[in-house]
Amino acid sequence: MAKPQPFNDVGLLVLISLAGGPKHGHSMLLDIDGFARVRLGPGTLYGAISRLEEQGEIEPIEQDGRRRPYRLTERGRRHLGIRLGSLDRTVRAGLTRTAP
């Protein structure tokens, strides 16, 4: 039996993590590992953070000591809802087609 592949849309994982509330990078790494069982490297995470910030989907908030937390913007929340709706339809179709 083939080993399941981890979900690899890092941007979507970051948006899902931040939908639970503002977090700094290390907290996002732990959260993503917890809900998706995906261990991201810091370079991968911060590359996604930079892209999402440039796209206006997340924004930094006041620093907590050395840590810089981020939160979803309204644009990011809308985009996340659209993406999750699309994934939901895709997953339901796949499950229906593979049911015995």
Image (spheres, rainbow, N blue to C red):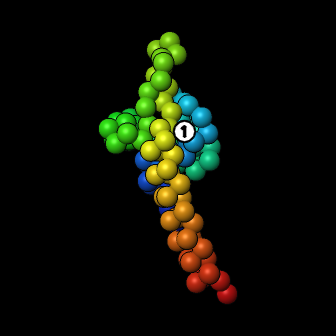
Position of residue 54 in the picture relative to residue 79 (left or right): left
User: In the rendered image, which residue does mark 1 sit on?
Assistant: 18
Q: Residue at x 49, y 58 (%)?
A: 82
- Residue 17, by quadrant, is top right
Q: Amino acid at mark 1?
A: Leu
Residue 38 percent location from the top left of the image: 53, 48
Question: Could you tell me if residue 45 is visible in this image?
Answer: no
User: What crowding class fits label 1: few (fewer than 14 Cα within 10 Å), some (14-19), or many (20 or more)?
Assistant: many
The residue lying furthest to the front in this view is 74
Above or below — where is 83 with respect to 45?
A: below
Position of residue 95 in the picture relative to residue 68 (left or right): right
Q: Secondary structure at mark 1?
A: helix
Q: Residue at x 43, y 47 (%)?
A: 11
Position of the N terminus by quadrant? bottom right
The residue lying furthest to the right in this view is 100
Residue 70 percent location from the top left of the image: 48, 30
Position of the C terminus by quadrant? bottom right
- Residue 45, by quadrant, is top left
Above or below — where is 69 with respect to 43?
A: above
Above or below — where is 95 with respect to 46?
A: below
Q: Residue at x 56, y 31 (%)?
A: 22
Question: Could you tell me if residue 66 is visible in this image?
Answer: yes
Q: Residue at x 55, y 46 (%)?
A: 16
The residue lying furthest to the bottom in this view is 100
Residue 23 percent location from the top left of the image: 54, 30
